[in-house]
Image (cartoon, rainbow, N blue to C red):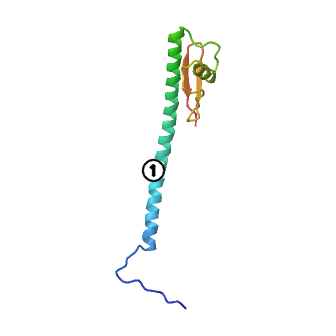
Amino acid sequence: MMEKKKLPSHVKGFTIMEVIVVIAILGALTALALPKFTGVLANSQIKTDYANVRIVDSAVELYRAEKDALPTGITSFEGLVTKLYGDGYLKNATITSASGGSFSYDSKTGAVSFAPKTQ
């Protein structure tokens, strides 16, 4: 049978209770911080969507200023983005919602809007 070796008296370590307490504290801190982080993420996604609306709206205004008319034959936001991309007013061919909301385009007024996803 093997003998247990006893550690010298000057060697110190953590007890299992100390380790459990530290893990519990870290878990509590994580539980407090996680909802705040997810809230920040959702808020940044909505702000990204509104920024995309401003970009497309600026492209529509530039189109209107150069051609003295709104894009014709466009009935959807996706169609508007495709048209503006094809004419060189946007850098991206598609724009999708980062937050799950929906974009819309009113072809009569040239207004671009965003409706956030309802909970």
| SS category of the residue bearing label 1 | helix
Q: Nearer the viewer, residue 41 or 61?
A: 61
- Say which residue label 1 marks: 33
The residue at the point 46 percent across, 73 percent down is 16
The residue at the point 55 percent across, 91 percent down is 1
Q: For the residue marked with disc 1, what is the amino acid?
A: Ala
For residue 85, side relative to residue 31 (left or right): right
Q: Nearer the viewer, residue 61 or 17?
A: 61
- Image quarter where the C terminus lies is top right
Q: Where is residue 42 shown, x and y percent of the image?
A: 51, 39
Q: Where is residue 47 shown, x and y percent of the image?
A: 48, 32
Above or below for 30 versus 3: above
For residue 7, side relative to residue 53 (left or right): left
Q: Quadrant of residue 116?
A: top right
Above or below for 40 versus 17: above
Above or below for 82 versus 45: above
